[in-house]
Amino acid sequence: MVETLSAPDMAAFVQTLVGQAIETPTGRPNRVLVADGDQVLVGTEKSPEGRWVPVGWLQDAADRLWSAGELEISVASLGHRRTAFVAAVLQLLPGTIPSRPPRWIRLAEGATRSSDHD
């Protein structure tokens, strides 16, 4: 029987990033200021006070990545302009491999959902 892969719970995972600066694939820092259930406050160089990003965007991207095994990182693919932040979070998940240049994120062979983030 083939095991079905399921994406991590992104609301739980983003909680582990609060207070951290994470680097986008293009090298710009984003700081996770607050994770509040269904949204996360993200500070950037342009908006250090932060802007809210729906956790649903992260979950949708993770679900698509785990379903297809790869995900294009672009506004056209993801449907919103916070693609750099979404990519920054996804590339921190165990079993993900960002491409260079940063246009795709793929799952490593045999990647599974981590119990650390359930």
Image (cartoon, rainbow, N blue to C red):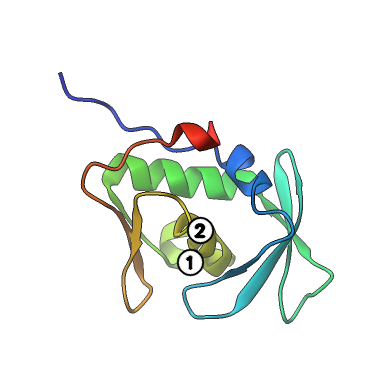
**Percent coordinates x, y for residue 117 in the rendering:** 53, 37
At 63% from the left edge and 40% from the top edge, which residue is drawn?
A: 11
16 lies left or right of 27: right
Q: Nearer the viewer, residue 79 or 88?
A: 88
Does dot 1 land on a helix, a strand or a loop? helix
What's under tag 2, amino acid-wise?
Gly
Snapshot quadrant of residue 38 = top right
At 35% from the left edge and 42% from the top edge, which residue is drawn?
A: 66
**Residue at the disc numbered 1:** 75
What's under tag 1, amino acid-wise?
Val
- Residue at the extreme right of the image, as rendered: 49
Does dot 2 land on a helix, a strand or a loop? loop
Q: Nearer the viewer, residue 76 or 104?
A: 104
Task: Please tell me how crowded label 1 is: few (under 14), some (14-19), or many (20+) other residues with Cα within 10 Å.
Answer: few
**Percent coordinates x, y for residue 76 in the rendering:** 43, 64
At 50% from the left edge and 58% from the top edge, which residue is drawn?
A: 79
Snapshot quadrant of residue 47 = bottom right
- Residue at the extreme left of the image, as rendered: 1
Snapshot quadrant of residue 5 = top left
**Percent coordinates x, y for residue 35 in the rendering:** 74, 48
**Percent coordinates x, y for residue 54 in the rendering:** 67, 49
**Residue at the disc numbered 2:** 79
Mark 2 and mark 1: Cα distance apart in space: 5 Å
Whether residues under marks 2 and 1 lie with C-beta atoms below 8 angstroms apart, the answer is yes
46 lies left or right of 68: right
Q: Nearer the viewer, residue 118 or 62?
A: 118
Task: Please tell me how crowded label 2 is: few (under 14), some (14-19), or many (20+) other residues with Cα within 10 Å.
Answer: few
Q: Quadrant of the N terminus?
A: top left
